[in-house]
Image (cartoon, rainbow, N blue to C red):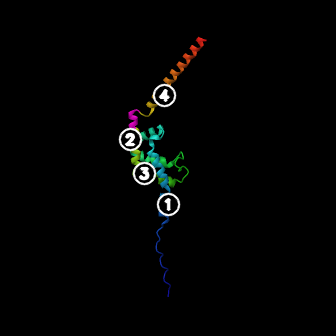
Amino acid sequence: CPEPPPPHPTPQHDTSEATDTSKLTAEAAPYVTKCLQAVAALATWPQQAHHWLLGLKSEHLVDTLARTLSEDTTGHFGLKKQSSELKAEVSRQLKASSKFSTTLHAELAKIKAKRSDGQTGTSAFSREMSIGMIVGLAAGWMLCSLYRRSKESS
């Protein structure tokens, strides 16, 4: 009698990919938190960053900032030397986060409001510089006058 063929192995689902994905998701979480905290403190960012963000088209704002933060070119978030897969996951989670989008738009609205009130930006800097120059000139003039008087009286 011929031997029966060996039984077909039951297909095994490859769970390593799912495990890798969940591991990557968990690994990205602290970086996502840091990025969310940074966006919540957007008002403290340099003026150049405000100009850049305000210059982006609103439909690209969330995507562009998520990618930029996840690239972490300054190393501030600890992602600079991490794998491209981890950076992509951080970017993906930020884009999917309603908190990221909501906070970003709220903080930008505050910055826009301050600019329209004249509280920040180039005009405020110019005003401060003008005041500083006037005070400096007045102090210099007073010192020169006192010096001349002291020379005249001696």
Q: Secondary structure at mark 2?
A: helix
Q: Sort mark 4 into few (<14), some (14-19) or many (20+) by Cα contacts within 10 Å.
A: few
What amino acid type is highlighted by mark number 2?
Answer: Ala
Q: Is residue 54 above or below residue 130?
A: below
Mark 2–mark 1 distance (CA, rounded to whole Å): 36 Å
Residue 129's disc number: 4
Q: Identify the mark nearer the N-term, 2 or 1.
A: 1
Give left or right: position of 118 versus 82. Answer: left
Q: Identify the mark nearer the N-term, 2 or 3.
A: 3
Q: Position of residue 16 (x, y in %)?
A: 50, 65
Q: Position of residue 31 (x, y in %)?
A: 49, 52
The residue closer to the viewer here, 133 or 93, is 133
The residue closer to the viewer here, 136 or 103, is 136
Q: Which part of the image, by quadrant, shows the C terminus?
A: top right
Q: Secondary structure at mark 3?
A: helix
Closer to the camera: disc 4 or disc 2?
4
What amino acid type is highlighted by mark number 4?
Answer: Met
The residue closer to the viewer here, 4 or 41, is 41
Q: Disc 2 vs disc 1: Cβ atoms closer than 8 Å? A: no
Name the residue at 44% across, 31% down. Answer: 124
Q: Residue furthest right?
A: 154
Q: Residue furthest front?
A: 153
Q: Disc 3 vs disc 4: Cβ atoms closer than 8 Å? A: no
What residue sits right under mark 1 in the picture?
23
Mark 1–mark 4 distance (CA, rounded to whole Å): 52 Å
What amino acid type is highlighted by mark number 3?
Answer: Lys
Give left or right: position of 116 versus 142. Answer: left
What residue sits right under mark 3 in the picture?
95
Closer to the camera: disc 2 or disc 1?
2
- Residue range in magenta is 112-118
What residue sits right under mark 2 in the picture?
109
Closer to the camera: disc 1 or disc 4?
4
